[in-house]
C-alpha cells in the first residue's frame, strides 16, 4: 500500500544523507517534498500540516544541523513523528470482564463479518474461548456467511431466535455466560451510507450489552473517506479502537496515517490479506519504519512463528546438519513460505529497498515450481539422482509444464542445497533456525 510513498520518502532522505552538512534551506526543501508525498498519499491535510510543523521545529534545531550525521537525524525525527501520528505504541484489547463483549461496527462492505471471524481466530490462538454473534439481520446471507466461517474455525456462532439485532446480541452474551465462553464478538449491521436508523440501533445494542470494546472497521482502500466516516461514527457512538481492512491493497495509505490523529482512537488491528489468518496487531513504530523503507522484520518473524510448522523446521535443521537436504525438504519449505502470503508481501517487510527494486516477483513461477515438485513421487523427491529423461517427461505432463521447467526446478534445488551447505559450514548449524540457514 505504501510503495509510492516509501519511494518518494526514500529519495528525499537519500539526498539529505548524501550531504555532509545541512542548511536550514536544505531541510526545508526536503520537508516540502515530504509534505507533497504525504498529500499525494491521501493523508488528511490537517494531519500533514500538524506533522510537518512538528518535524520542522525539531529538524532545523541546532542539535540536528550541527550533528555529524544530520541527514540520519532528520530520518529519525520523521520516523518518531510518524510513529506518534499513528498512536505511538500498540494498543491491545480491553477484555477484563467475563465474558468480555466486543462490538464490530462500520459501513456495509468494510469487511466486518470476515474481520469478526479473523479476530475470533486471533483470540482463540491466544487461549481465549470466543463466540461469534450474528446481529446483522439485513444484509442477505450475512448470518450464513458468519456461520460458515465459525464452522470452519470450530467457533460457536449464536444467531438467536429473534429477528431483532438487540435481542440477538443480548442472547449471545447470555449464551456465553451459560457455556463459559470468555469473549463475545458481535457482528453488527452496516449500511451503504450512514443513517440515523443504523446509529440508533448501534446505540441500543451498546446499552443492552455494555461492550468492553467497540471497534470501528474501516476499508483502508477508501482513503480519506474512511477517515470522514470514522469521525462520524466516533461522534455518534464513541468507539474505542479501529480495525483497518485491506491494508495489503494498492491504495495510497492515507487512512492509516490519518485516522488516529482525527479520532484520537488507536488502530488495534489491520487486515493484510483475504485469508482468515491475515489479521495482525497494529504496531505504529513498525509501520513507520516500513513506510520509510526500513522494513518490518519483527512482524515477519512473528508471522512465521505462528504460521510455520515448528516440527518441519526442526526436521529440516536435522537434515541440513547431516547434509541430507532433499527435494521433499525443498517442497515443504516452499509450502511453509507460502503460508506467509505473497512473496511481494514478504519482500515489503525486509529492509532491502535496493534489492527489492531489482527483484521481479512472479507468483506464477512459485506456483509452477510447486506443481513440478508435487508431480514427483516421494521416492524421486527423496533421491533426485534417479530423475532421468523419461521421469522428467512424466513429471512435466503431470504438472502441466515442460521438461525445461522441470530442469529449472532441479537446478534451483541444487543451487539452494549448495547455498545451505555453505551457510551451515560458515556460520555453524548449531542453534541456527532453518530460515536463518537458508539466508532468509
Image (cartoon, rainbow, N blue to C red):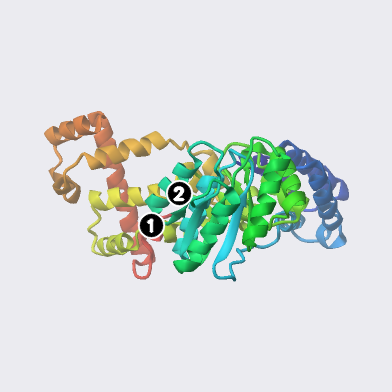
Q: Nearer the viewer, mark 1 or mark 2?
A: 2
What percent of the width, then of the height, locates residue 177? 50, 67
Q: Nearer the viewer, residue 194 or 263?
A: 194
The residue beneath circle 1 is 308
**Label placed on residue 276:** 2
Q: Nearer the viewer, residue 370 or 125?
A: 125
Question: Residue at left 70%, top 39%?
Answer: 194
Relative to residue 156, is residue 358 depicted above or below?
Answer: above
Q: Label 2, secondary structure: give it.
A: loop
What percent of the width, then of the height, locates residue 185? 54, 56
- 1 or 2: tag closer to the N-terminus: 2
Q: Nearer the viewer, residue 113 or 118?
A: 113
Question: Residue at left 55%, top 45%?
Answer: 136
Q: Nearer the viewer, residue 409 or 411?
A: 409
Residue 92 seen in render: yes
Relative to residue 368, is residue 423 depicted above or below?
Answer: below
Relative to residue 391, is residue 283 depicted above or below?
Answer: below
Amino acid at each position: 500500500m505504501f510503495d509510492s510513498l516509501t519511494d518518494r520518502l526514500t529519495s528525499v532522505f537519500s539526498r539529505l544523507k548524501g550531504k555532509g552538512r545541512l542548511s536550514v534551506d536544505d531541510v526545508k526543501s526536503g520537508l516540502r517534498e515530504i509534505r507533497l508525498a504525504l498529500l499525494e498519499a491521501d493523508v488528511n491535510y490537517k494531519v500533514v500540516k500538524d506533522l510537518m510543523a512538528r518535524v520542522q521545529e525539531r529538524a532545523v534545531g541546532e542539535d540536528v544541523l550541527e550533528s555529524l550525521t544530520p541527514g540520519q537525524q532528520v530520518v529519525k525525527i520523521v520516523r518518531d513523528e510518524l510513529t506518534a501520528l499513528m498512536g505511538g505504541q500498540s494498543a491491545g484489547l480491553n477484555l477484563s470482564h467475563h465474558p468480555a463483549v466486543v462490538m464490530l461496527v462500520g459501513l456495509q462492505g468494510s469487511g466486518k463479518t470476515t474481520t469478526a471471524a479473523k479476530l475470533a481466530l486471533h483470540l482463540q490462538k491466544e487461549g481465549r474461548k470466543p463466540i461469534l454473534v450474528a446481529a446483522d439481520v439485513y444484509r442477505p446471507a450475512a448470518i450464513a456467511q458468519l456461520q460458515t466461517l465459525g464452522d470452519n474455525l470450530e467457533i460457536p456462532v449464536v444467531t438467536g431466535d429473534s429477528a431483532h439485532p438487540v435481542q440477538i446480541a443480548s442472547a449471545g452474551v447470555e449464551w456465553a455466560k451459560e457455556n463459559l465462553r470468555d469473549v463475545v464478538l458481535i457482528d453488527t449491521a452496516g449500511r451503504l451510507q450512514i443513517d440515523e436508523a443504523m446509529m440508533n440501533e448501534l446505540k441500543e445494542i451498546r446499552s443492552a450489552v455494555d461492550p468492553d470494546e467497540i471497534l470501528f472497521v474501516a476499508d483502508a482502500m477508501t482513503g480519506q473517506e474512511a477517515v470522514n466516516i470514522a469521525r462520524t461514527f466516533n461522534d455518534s457512538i464513541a468507539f474505542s479502537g479501529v480495525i483497518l481492512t485491506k491494508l495489503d491493497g494498492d491504495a495510497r495509505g492515507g487512512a492509516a496515517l490519518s485516522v488516529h490523529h482525527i479520532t484520537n482512537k488507536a488502530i488495534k488491528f489491520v487486515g493484510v490479506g483475504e485469508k482468515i489468518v491475515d489479521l495482525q496487531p497494529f504496531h505504529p513504530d513498525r509501520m513507520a519504519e516500513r513506510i520509510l523503507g526500513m522494513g518490518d522484520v519483527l512482524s515477519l518473524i512473528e508471522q512465521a512463528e505462528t504460521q510455520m510448522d515448528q516440527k518441519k523446521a526442526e526436521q529440516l535443521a536435522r537434515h541440513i546438519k547431516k547434509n541430507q537436504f532433499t527435494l521433499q525438504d525443498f517442497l515443504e519449505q516452499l509450502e511453509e513460505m507460502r503460508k506467509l502470503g505473497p512473496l511481494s508481501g514478504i519482500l515489503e517487510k525486509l529492509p532491502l529497498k535496493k534489492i527489492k527494486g531489482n527483484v521481479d516477483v512472479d507468483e506464477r513461477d512459485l506456483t509452477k515450481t510447486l506443481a513440478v515438485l508435487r508431480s514427483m513421487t516421494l521416492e524421486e523427491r527423496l533421491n533426485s539422482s534417479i530423475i532421468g529423461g523419461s521421469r522428467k517427461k512424466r513429471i512435466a505432463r503431470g504438472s502441466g509444464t515442460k521438461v525445461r521447467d522441470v530442469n529449472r526446478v532441479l537446478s534451483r534445488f541444487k543451487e539452494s542445497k549448495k547455498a545451505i551447505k555453505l551457510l551451515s559450514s560458515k556460520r555453524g548449524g548449531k542453534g541456527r533456525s532453518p530460515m536463518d540457514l537458508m539466508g532468509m
